[in-house]
Each structure stands twice: as structure tokens, then as C-alpha cells.
Image (cartoon, rainbow, N blue to C red):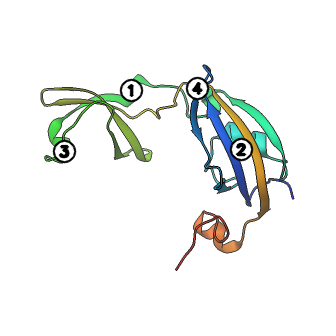
Amino acid sequence: MQIAKDTAVWLHYTLRNDAGEVLDESEKDEPLNYIHGQGDIVPGLEKALTGKGAGAKLKVSVEPDEGYGERSDERVQTVDRNAFENETEIVPGMQFQAQGPEGLSIVTVVQVVGDHVTIDANHPLAGQRLHFEIEVVNVRKASDEELEHGHVHGEGGHHHH
């Protein structure tokens, strides 16, 4: 079976930046699984995987506009310290979930000066070219239940109890 919309896909991947540094990779015994066509992976990678089958190995470079987008200065802002829970010590590099106009996103603390905290809502990989090495492990039709829930169930997937 080939990867197409509404197929359940298992793959091993290594993600590198332009300098060749490993940014992320799947666990040796635990391939990443997702349902193709639901926006669970970056668009450029999804396009490259369409039509591939189990056993396929490929290298894909994804430009920012088909990855995590370009960096936007508008997504960097300074907020009052009281926007955070009081007992939390806020230091640069910390990440928080925040509700924004596009839904839930991760913001990273860039700087703390007195009661002012500068946060960056850009994805940490925004503006970067992404280099993936992929091995497709398995492909099958996603079940109606998986499509309804938006994730893979069963073997190597999500289990409901």
C-alpha cells in the first residue's frame, strides 16, 4: 500500500539542520506514527511521502515555507511578569504553552528584565531549512475510528482503555 490521504503511516526519521546537527529523531524501536493528510507533520514532508510504500528510504529537504514557516518579529513580544504563575522562576530558554489567535502554541522565554518577560511565539525551527532522512516502516488504511479521533490506534499507536 502507498501513502495517501487517510492512511496510517509509521516511519523512522532523523531531522538535521543546515549544519548537519541532529535536531530530532525517532526512537530506535518506536517509529513515529501519524495519519497522512491531517496536517500532523510539516507540509513539505507530507508531500514528499505521498505515494511511497513500506521500505522506502528517502532524504527530503524542506524549505521554511513548507516547514515551520518564516520567523516573524511580530511573534516576539514583551509581557508583564504577572502573566505567569507567581511561584514559577522565569529564566531564558523556558517554554510555556500559550493560547493565541491560531490556537495553542509554544512560547519560549527570550529575556527577563525586572517585571518584563520577552517571549517568542515563533516555532523554534521557524526560518530553518529542515533535512529529513526517512525510512517508511508500515502503511495501512486508517480505520474510521482513527480518522474520527485523529490519531493511530492499536499496535504502535494510541490505546484506549
Q: Earlier in the sequence, mark 4 or mark 3?
A: 4
**Can you give x and y, in whole percent of width and height, for residue 150 in the image?**
60, 63
Image point (87%, 59%), residue name = 1
Nearer-the-camera pick, 56 or 48: 56
Q: Label 4, on which residue?
A: 21
Q: Amino acid at mark 1?
A: Glu
Is the residue under label 1 in contact with that under label 2 (CB below 8 Å)? no
- Under circle 3, the secondary element is loop
Is the residue under label 1 in contact with that under label 4 (CB below 8 Å)? no
Mark 3 and mark 2: Cα distance apart in space: 38 Å
Mark 4 and mark 3: Cα distance apart in space: 32 Å
For mark 2, does the 10 Å Cα neighbourhood hold few (<14), some (14 to 19), or many (20 or more) residues?
A: some
Q: Which mark is residue 88?
A: 3
Image point (19%, 45%), residue name = 88
Image point (13%, 31%), residue name = 115
Disc nearest the viewer among 3 and 2: 3
Residue 67's place in the image compared with 33, above or below, is above
Q: Amino acid at mark 2?
A: Glu
Q: Label 1, on which residue?
A: 74
For mark 3, does the 10 Å Cα neighbourhood hold few (<14), some (14 to 19), or many (20 or more) residues?
A: few
- Under circle 2, the secondary element is helix
Left-right relation of 64 to 108: right
Q: Amino acid at mark 3?
A: Thr
Residue 28's place in the image compared with 145, above or below, is above
Disc nearest the viewer among 4 and 1: 4
Q: Residue furthest bottom?
A: 161
Mark 3 and mark 1: Cα distance apart in space: 26 Å
Disc nearest the viewer among 4 and 2: 4
Left-right relation of 140 to 122: right
Image point (68%, 35%), residue name = 132
Q: Which mark is residue 46?
A: 2
For mark 4, does the 10 Å Cα neighbourhood hold few (<14), some (14 to 19), or many (20 or more) residues?
A: few
